[in-house]
Image (cartoon, grey):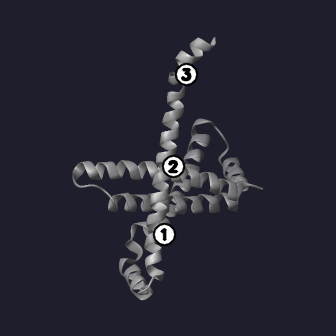
Amino acid sequence: MNIRAWAHEGPALSQPLAAIGRSVLFLLAALGRVTLFGASAVSHIFRPPFYPREFGAALLKVGWFSLPVVGLLVVPVLVAVGDVIGIYGGFLVATGSLGFNPATYIHNTWNFLTESDMVSSLVKGAVFGFIATVMGCYHGMRSGRGAQGVGHATKTSVEAAAVLILAANFLLTNIFFSS
């Protein structure tokens, strides 16, 4: 390719990179807003006038039904149920369709399933549930008016949660399986 052709093709080649850069910057800005929102909320506990008692009372009043707490507690239960269903589904396929010996399947599953596999799946489920619910709460509280504002808040919360879950999965996988 000569220089003239490269100069003509240059803008077309740089557009995908510019789109990726804009998306990354948008997500970093959203992450920064969420961080500032969280820091501002936490700082209200420690600033005069001090309200730790009121904060504790509000937390107990909202209690275990607040979305982030539900995300922390319920999603690991769903992950555990999904793990059991997955193992049982694998058993049905292996023994029914593929003709494996049922005792061998159960024996191998028991031997290869480690405690770190179970712990990592439950911790990841708790972290992912917490991220999804916090993003939903954050963007829901900042939604615009009407159906269009709620739709936009829903879309941005799903996008932010997906990116943060991907990043958290990378970090947690490195933490659990680095050695």
At which x and y percent is residue 139? 37, 57
Cα distance between the residues tagged 2 and 1: 20 Å
Pick out the residue farthest to the right.
179
**What residue sits 58% from the left and 61% below the top?**
122
CA separation, marks 3 and 1? 43 Å
The reply to whether residue 71 is in sight is no
Name the amino acid, label 1.
Ala
- The local secondary structure at tag 2 comes to helix
**Which residue shows up at 34% across the image and 52% down it?**
153
Image quadrant where residue 62 sits: bottom left
Which residue type carries mark 3? Answer: Gly
Amino acid type, residue under disc 2 in the picture: Val
Q: Check the image and report above or below for 24 versus 9.
A: below
Task: Report the mark closest to the observer, 2 or 3.
Answer: 3
Task: Give percent across and percent down for residue 117.
Answer: 66, 57
Q: Residue at x 48, y 42 (%)?
A: 23
Q: Is residue 22 above or below residue 163?
A: above
Q: Nearer the viewer, residue 126 or 25?
A: 25
Residue appearing at x 59%, y 47% in the figure:
91
Marks 2 and 3, Cα distance to the nearest angstrom? Answer: 30 Å
What's the mark number on residue 163? 2
